[in-house]
């Protein structure tokens, strides 16, 4: 689903944000992107969502080379993925329903379909009773769940999250993570960036560990290798 | 997963009946964008009204000038046809001779009609109109010459009329030929100058409307920067982001145009009566014309297009710069 091939990213201001990063997140896979702040987690996610472009190397999303994607193609790429932000990026001038409906409205779904899907998504995150409220009145955890509902309402095959539990207490964090796992169980590929190693270690998903822009641990490669060895032995 | 370009109509593709739904989805989006712009404008009615008022006044000024010019022109053309040549006959010319000349000239192809006013008739007319009867009596002799009034064809150009006057003035029996035309030519010349001036002013004010709308939309864009970033992050195309702002500009322009129609209608209504009085003093049947439905609609359309243009300028310059970082 996501393939990085010797990807480097250098900002004009100087300094390598990413250096020679390669990994492959398979379709239906779920993994965590770990590293200290400044290690390059955000940059890596930005490359996937085409918010930034790689300086060197190739980024492939579902077989599509982002280096060859024109400016006009970017919105259609982003519609294939759901993105959850640390600060939610909700619009406070409209209701929870309208926030979650936004991706569908942008994609041009008929209104009846929009209503059905928005309620399904809100039901999934347990906020169906809040559809008419303004998100500003919700708690941090609830806002994050609205953000998740918005990310999945379009039924993307890839879900990205940048520090989704950054502002939440441990209990809420566990809840949010279990939500992501539920989406993964129905076939959505998931990549979550977090600095909270203790939270994700126990979950048993592959880890990608970044340090100063370099990938120092690739859980996906290890798992693929292990599976290959098992198959070899069997 | 399909490639990005096939994903364009993701929503419709799954619903089947693709062509029909494409159009209806597109219309839905436009309706939503228009409704959203309207809602935004209505949330701050005073600011909206102020912007519309600036546009309205900027549009009303040249429109009112054009309307006045139009009236002045119709006034000029009214009297164009009345251009006439007065032939003053020599003292020695007899009454019958004058009448004969009048008949002879009336037969010419470049003359519509003539009228002979004999010396006695002229005296009687003068006595009646001027009130100087007693002065005339004291003169003893009739000082007035006979006159043949020549009406050239209404279609004759001012130059042709002047040439005709010169030709008739050279006749033996004619002392002098006067053309009652110069003031019409001057009026035309003055109107020409004013017309050009008004066109320049109108162009400048049109640019002003573009800038006013452009600046308003620019501030609107900057104020909604975060919202733009968010919708771009979740897959909005440039067109989707642009649409509400363009509708906003068009609505500003339309409101301004409607306001201009009101202002001009009011102003012309106020001018109409004194103008009619003035025309009456000159014995003219001139009718002052206000703003008709056609020009009102044209004015509103102009306002809308200017608003759209201004918004387009702002959107083109600023939206591209706002990208997720």
Image (tube, coloured by chain):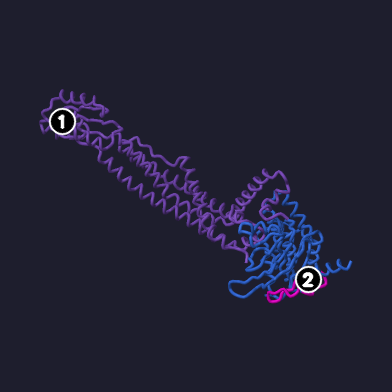
Chain colours: A blue, B purple
- Is residue B50 shown to the viewer in this render? no
Query: Looking at the rendering, in which quadrant would you find the C terminus of chain A?
Result: bottom right
Q: Who's the residue at 58% across and 71% down the image? A: A12
Q: Check residue B171 in the rendering and tell me which mark sits there, or answer none.
A: 1
The residue closer to the viewer here, B233 or A121, is: B233
Give the foreground label among 1 and 2: 2
- Is residue B97 shown to the viewer in this render? yes
* Circle 1: element type: loop
Q: Residue furthest front?
A: A232
The chain holding disc 2 is A
The residue closer to the viewer here, B112 or B44, is: B112
How packed is label 2: few (under 14 Cα within 10 Å), some, or many (20 or more)?
Answer: many
Residue range of the region highlighted in magenta in the rendering: A197-219
Measuring from the top left, give residue A128's x and y in whole percent.
Answer: 77, 57
Q: Who's the residue at 68% across and 52% down the image? A: B6
How packed is label 1: few (under 14 Cα within 10 Å), some, or many (20 or more)?
Answer: few
Q: Does residue B245 sit above or below B144 in this rendering?
A: below
The residue closer to the viewer here, B210 or A26, is: A26
| Mark count | 2
Measuring from the top left, give residue A96's x and y in whole percent.
Answer: 71, 59
Residue A28, image quadrant? bottom right
Q: Is residue A198 magenta?
A: yes
Q: Is residue A221 magenta?
A: no
Measuring from the top left, give residue B231's x and y in whole percent.
Answer: 64, 59
Residue B208, image quadrant? bottom left
Q: Check residue A219 in the rendering and tell me which mark sits there, or answer none.
A: 2
């Amino acid at each position: 689903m996501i393939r990085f091939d010797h990807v480097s990213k250098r900002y004009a201001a100087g300094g390598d944000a990413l250096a020679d990063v390669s990994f492959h997140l398979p379709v239906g896979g779920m993994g965590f992107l770990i590293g200290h702040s400044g290690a390059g987690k955000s940059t890596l996610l930005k490359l996937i969502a085409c918010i930034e472009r790689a300086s060197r190397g190739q980024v492939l999303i579902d077989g599509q080379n982002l280096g060859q994607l024109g400016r006009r193609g970017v919105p259609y790429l982003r519609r294939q993925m759901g993105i959850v932000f640390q600060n939610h990026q909700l619009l406070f001038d409209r209701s929870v329903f309208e926030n979650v409906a936004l991706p569908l409205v942008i994609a041009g779904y008929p209104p009846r379909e929009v209503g059905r899907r928005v309620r399904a998504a809100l039901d999934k995150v347990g906020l169906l009773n809040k559809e008419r409220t303004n998100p500003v009145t919700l708690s941090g955890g609830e806002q994050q769940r609205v953000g998740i509902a918005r990310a999945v309402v379009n039924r993307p095959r890839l879900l990205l999250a940048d520090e989704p539990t950054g502002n939440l207490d441990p209990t809420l964090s566990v809840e949010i993570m279990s939500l992501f796992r539920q989406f993964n169980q129905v076939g959505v590929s998931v990549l979550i960036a977090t600095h909270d190693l203790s939270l994700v270690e126990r979950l048993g998903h592959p880890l990608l560990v970044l340090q100063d822009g370099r990938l120092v641990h690739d859980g996906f490669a290890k798992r693929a290798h292990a599976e290959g060895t098992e198959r070899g032995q069997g | 997963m399909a490639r990005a370009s096939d994903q364009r109509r993701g929503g419709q593709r799954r619903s089947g009946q693709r062509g029909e739904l494409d159009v209806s989805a597109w219309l839905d989006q436009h309706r939503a964008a228009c409704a959203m712009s309207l809602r935004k404008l209505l949330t701050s009615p005073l600011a909206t009204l102020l912007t519309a008022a600036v546009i309205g006044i900027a549009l009303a000024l040249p429109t009112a000038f054009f309307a006045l010019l139009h009236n002045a022109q119709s006034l000029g053309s009214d009297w164009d046809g009345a251009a006439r040549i007065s032939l003053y006959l020599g003292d020695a010319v007899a009454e019958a001779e004058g009448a004969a000349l009048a008949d002879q000239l009336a037969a010419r192809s470049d003359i519509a009609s003539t009228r002979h006013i004999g010396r006695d008739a002229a005296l009687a007319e003068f006595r009646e109109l001027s009130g100087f009867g007693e002065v005339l009596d004291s003169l003893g002799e009739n000082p007035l010459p006979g006159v043949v009034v020549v009406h050239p064809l209404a279609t004759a150009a001012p130059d042709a009329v002047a040439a005709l006057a010169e030709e008739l003035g050279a006749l033996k029996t004619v002392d002098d030929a006067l053309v009652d035309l110069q003031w019409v030519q001057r009026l035309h010349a003055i109107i020409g100058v004013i017309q050009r001036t008004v066109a320049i002013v109108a162009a400048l004010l049109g640019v002003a409307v573009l800038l006013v709308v452009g600046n308003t939309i620019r501030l609107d864009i900057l104020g909604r920067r975060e919202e733009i970033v968010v919708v771009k992050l979740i897959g909005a195309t440039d067109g989707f982001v642009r649409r509400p702002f363009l509708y906003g500009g068009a609505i500003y322009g339309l409101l301004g145009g409607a306001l201009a129609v009101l202002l001009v209608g009011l102003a012309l209504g106020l001018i109409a009566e004194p103008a009619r009085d003035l025309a009456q003093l000159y014995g003219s049947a001139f009718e002052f014309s206000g703003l008709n439905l056609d020009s009102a609609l044209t004015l509103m359309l102009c306002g809308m297009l200017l608003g759209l243009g201004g918004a387009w300028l702002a959107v083109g310059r600023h939206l591209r710069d706002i990208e997720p970082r």
